[in-house]
Image (cartoon, rainbow, N blue to C red):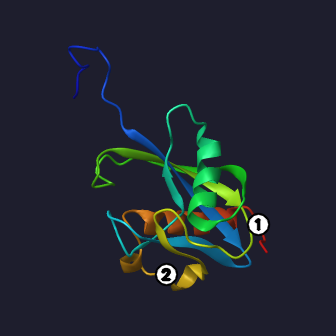
């Protein structure tokens, strides 16, 4: 267990990130990571929440920065928090179900942004635990009924 800093008495905390799970026209929106960690692997668009930023605003900002798309938060899908899920340290990610459409344009740290057939993605293609997020997203989508 950790303890507070002896000087400032603050507890060490994990970093907070957000991911956008977007489904449209029978496809899921993924980026190809342009930087390490997981450079060249597919991932949900997302990134770190900035100090003072609402996580719901952060996920829409990240979607716009990485994919050039405007979106609308539908709700929270899941929280990922395994301490060793990210090689940069303990990162907790809020995965939001986001509604968006259009032709994505890669930006920020995304080398590519595209709509993918969810059933044709393999674990080896995905960054970190994002394949598990994809599998959970499939189950989530099937639980909410017919989709476009």
Mark 2 or 1: in front is 2
Task: Using the image as rendered, state which of residue 115 and residue 138 is in the foreground.
Answer: 115
Task: Using the image as rendered, state which of residue 57 and residue 135 is in the foreground.
Answer: 57
Tell me the residue at 49%/81% (across/down).
121
The location of residue 147, given as percent across then percent down, is 77, 71
The location of residue 135, given as percent across then percent down, is 52, 68
Q: What is the CA distance from the residue labelled 2 to the residue labelled 1?
A: 22 Å
The location of residue 49, given as percent across then percent down, is 51, 42
Label 1: state its secondary structure.
Answer: loop
The image quadrant of residue 122 is bottom left
Seen in the image, is 87 located left or right of residue 115?
left
Mark 2 lies on residue: 121
Tell me the residue at 61%/59% (across/down).
63
Tell me the residue at 23%/19% (across/down).
5
Q: Quadrant of the N terminus?
A: top left
The image quadrant of residue 45 is bottom right
Q: Please tell me whether residue 104 is drawn above or below residue 12 in the rendered image.
A: below
The location of residue 72, given as percent across then percent down, is 74, 54
Q: Quadrant of the C terminus?
A: bottom right
Seen in the image, is 61 located left or right of residue 81?
right
Task: Using the image as rendered, state which of residue 52 and residue 131 is in the foreground.
Answer: 52
Tell me the residue at 32%/44% (across/down).
90
Mark 2 crowd level (few <14, some 14–19, many ≥20, 10 Å Cα): few
The image quadrant of residue 12 is top left
Seen in the image, is 20 located left or right of residue 16?
right
Mark 1 lies on residue: 145
Q: Please tell me whether residue 11 is drawn above or below residue 128 in the rendered image.
A: above
Q: Residue furthest bottom?
A: 120
């Amino acid at each position: 267990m950790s303890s507070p800093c002896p000087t400032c008495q603050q507890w060490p905390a994990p970093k907070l990130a957000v991911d956008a799970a977007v489904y449209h026209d029978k496809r899921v929106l993924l980026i190809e990571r342009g930087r390490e960690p997981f450079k060249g692997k597919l991932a949900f668009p997302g990134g770190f929440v900035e100090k003072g930023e609402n996580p719901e605003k952060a996920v829409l900002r990240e979607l716009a920065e990485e994919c050039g798309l405007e979106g609308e938060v539908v709700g929270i899908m899941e929280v990922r928090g395994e301490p060793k899920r990210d090689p940069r340290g303990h990162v907790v990610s809020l995965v939001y179900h986001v509604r968006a459409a259009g032709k994505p344009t890669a930006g920020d740290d995304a080398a590519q942004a595209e709509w993918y057939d969810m059933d044709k993605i393999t674990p080896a293609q995905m960054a970190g635990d994002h394949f598990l997020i994809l599998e959970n997203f499939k189950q989530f989508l099937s639980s909410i009924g017919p989709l476009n």
